[in-house]
Amino acid sequence: MCAAQSDSEDGRRALADLCDAYYEPVLAFLRCELRDADAARELSHAFFAEMLAGGSISGADRERGRFRSYLLGAVKHFVSKRREFSERVKRGGGLEAVSLESDEVAELADARQTTPDVEFDRQWAVTVLARGLEALRHECEAGGRGDFFERVKPLLSGDTGYGDQAALAAACGMNLDAFRMAVHRLKKRLRECVKEEVAGTLDDPAMVQQEMQNLFAALGGG
């Protein structure tokens, strides 16, 4: 995150990489906020285009130091500005404003099962976990264990009921104890990969453990 705050070519590239990686949480927030998938996608593109045009995230919340918090605050601010503009156009007359909220959205508001903030955090956690899994997959492929990773990936991502572990062990040419130990080691390495991904979105390394707790709480709450 520190690199992305730099007003330089490297800083702009780092910011673009972060935005590309964490597009889905913003889209999830807007889908929940607007209750319109097409409008959410269109607004997501507009948000990131404006964000990247700024070239840096020097306005990020330095006290909290989390890219997650900054991104959520930034998209809320963006939506608020769009609504204010829409209201000004309506009051000015002569132009038809595209409202960010329809009558259908208003009717659905009370029926929401989760808030946009909760949905943002849940999708953020899913994205971080997916990126951790991808990093681990590359490691396994580089070590000649890509096939083993693909076989046990559902176990790593929490699907403990996936398949017959004895049959999986046999398919991997391992006895059950050795198989379970190998999966345990991969789970441990996955957690390290996730921590590394989380650390890359923070200014302060001391915040990693708290952010990890937030991440698993968001996954558990999903």
Image: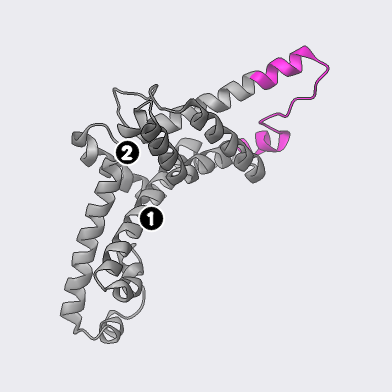
Q: Main secondary structure of the magenta part?
A: helix
Decide: is 194 above or below 87.
Answer: below
Disc 2: which residue: 201
Label annotation for residue 20 = none
- Residue at x 66%, y 33% (from the top left corner): 106
- The three-letter amino acid code for the residue at tag 2 is Thr
Give the residue drawn at x 16%, y 79%.
177
Q: Residue at x 29, y 75 (%)?
A: 148
Residue 130 vs residue 36, the one in the foreground: 130
Q: Earlier in the sequence, mark 2 or mark 1?
A: 1
Q: Is residue 137 visible?
A: yes
> Colour scheme of this structure image?
one colour
Is 148 placed left or right of 175 in the picture? right
Q: Residue at x 28, y 51 (%)?
A: 194
| Helix, strand or loop at mark 1 | helix
Closer to the camera in the image, 170 or 52: 52
Q: What is the crowding at mark 2: few (fewer than 14 residues within 10 Å), some, or many (at least 20)?
A: many
Please, what secondary structure does the residue beneath circle 2 have? Answer: loop
Q: Quadrant of residue 34?
A: top right
Q: Position of residue 153 (x, y in %)?
A: 34, 68
Disc 1 marks a residue whose amino acid type is Ala
Residue 86 is one of the magenta-drawn residues: yes
**From the viewer's perspective, is 144 left or right of 98?**
left
Q: Which residue is mark 1?
A: 130
Question: Splitting the image into 4 quarters, where does residue 45 fall?
Answer: top right
Span colored in magenta: 85-109
The N terminus sits in image quarter: top left
